[in-house]
Image (cartoon, grey):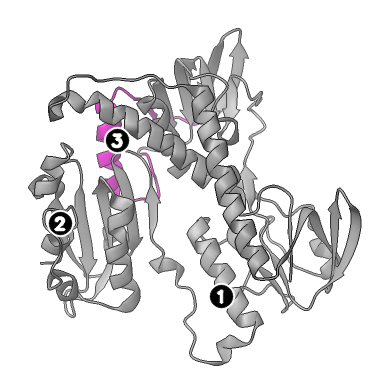
Amino acid sequence: MVLIERDTFGGAAHLWDCIPSKAMIATGNARSFMGRAMRMGLRDEGSSVDLDKLKERLRGIESRLEGSVRTLLSSQGVEMIDGIGSLLGPNLVSAVSDDGTREIEADAIVLATGSRPRVPDWANIDGDRILLTRDCYPPPVLPDHIVVIGSGVTGVEFVHMFQSMGSEVTLVVSRQQVLPQKDPEVAAALETDFLARGVKLLKGARATSVERVGDEVIVSCDDGRVARGSHALVAIGSIPNTEMLGLENAGVVSERGYVPVDVHLRSNVPHIYAAGDISGRLPLSSVASMQGRKIAEHAMGMTVRSHRHLDYDKAASAIFTEPEIADVGLAEADAFAEGRKVRVTKVPFASAAKALINDDSRGFVKIVSDPNTGVVLGGSIVGRHAAELISVIAVAATNGLTVSDIHESILVHPTLSEALSEAAE
């Protein structure tokens, strides 16, 4: 088995996206917690961000994770090539590295080249004042006032991160709510928290240009409004890394740069698979990892036995703002839009003793279930540790468990998870 990687073994999540952004968010969260310290009986509060130490911390995390991946792959006999791979034919791969060019014959090929931030033609990214997300690990300097363009998952995480580190933040929201694909109640909870923290929201404004004038960045919107700051961050989606893969050489069909796949993650060429962002499914590293597992099972012939295909509708996801947001399965708004009868139960964290102990009672737990059978169909959580707590609802929704199965489980007291039991009840 051969693995070709041009950047970091472990993928873009380790190098550019998930891990460094969450590490920086953790630093911001620590600073925010210090700001609340006096309410919890401590005298000293506040701290400043040391970007040099933060950068050192990020590189240390990246190095340790890549080292673990390399050690694991090596122990399994995987040959690792630091280079660029492309298809020469249906069963032939080119690997270009510092050692030269090598051709490798393969019975099965997995394409997992990820994606990169989308750069609109009206944004002159300079990596200094006008930034992409990948320019921010960490940024050259901590912005005095940053204008974030894009209110999806990535955009709101960076709003939280920069605000928690001490920057003034303006968020350009092209629609009438942040997180337009999420439950309106969930989005409203985040908007309320942003406003309470001093974040400025330009709702219903679509950015049309961003330009640098001296030490100022000016973002113009289609409705005539203008946002000014010391920096701007463009976070408006991503595009797949497939243009240099040589898909045409192997007869692999693509659509808008993505490689369509079937339930086994096969492209139109049966022995060539695609996983991760380029498959056009949910762009989550957790989904990509599970896709890789399913590909391995299929390629090794394990799917001749009982086999569970990936159910993307049951994939849990999280947004690492403060408060955190997590959801899985059927959303309340989607159920009502479809005219589907569901039972929705909601419990605020303000009723949980652990939330009061933590001095953070923001948010709620919401469970969506079938009114006739009690089977859990999905749920949303807004609040501290939502990304961890959603696992309970995800397991229930994936395995057809009922609200009684959750409620009749004896959970630890005092914990935030008790809100799950109360919502199930």
Residue sitting farthest toward the bottom: 305
Q: Amino acid at mark 2?
A: Ala
Look at the picture and state if 146 lies above or below 61.
above
* Disc with the residue nearer the chain's start (3 vs 1): 3
Q: What's under tag 3, amino acid-wise?
A: Glu
Would you say residue 161 sits in the magenta stretch? no
Q: Residue at x 56, y 87 (%)?
A: 303
Dot 1: element:
helix
Q: Quadrant of the N terminus?
A: bottom right
- Which residues fall within the magenta stretch? 178-206
Q: Earlier in the sequence, mark 2 or mark 1?
A: 1
Residue 191: numbered disc: 3
Give whichever of discs 2 and 3 has the lower sequence position.
3
Instruction: Write the residue at 46% across / 21% down.
Output: 50
The residue tagged 1 is 294
Q: CA distance from mark 3 to mark 1?
A: 38 Å
Which of the 4 quarters of the picture holds residue 413? bottom left
Q: Residues within 10 Å of mark 3 (few under 14, many from 20)?
A: some
Question: Marks 2 and 1, how far apart in space?
Answer: 34 Å
Q: Looking at the image, which is closer to me, 147 or 83? A: 83
Where residue 419 is drawn, which disc sits there?
A: 2
Q: Is residue 202 magenta?
A: yes
The crowd level at tag 1 (other Cα within 10 Å; few <14, some 14-19, many 20+) is many
CB-based contact (under 8 Å), mark 3 and mark 1:
no
Callout 2 environment at 10 Å: few (<14), some (14 to 19), or many (20+)?
A: many
Q: Residue at x 13, y 69 (%)?
A: 410
Which secondary structure, mark 3? helix
| Residue type, mark 1 in image | Lys
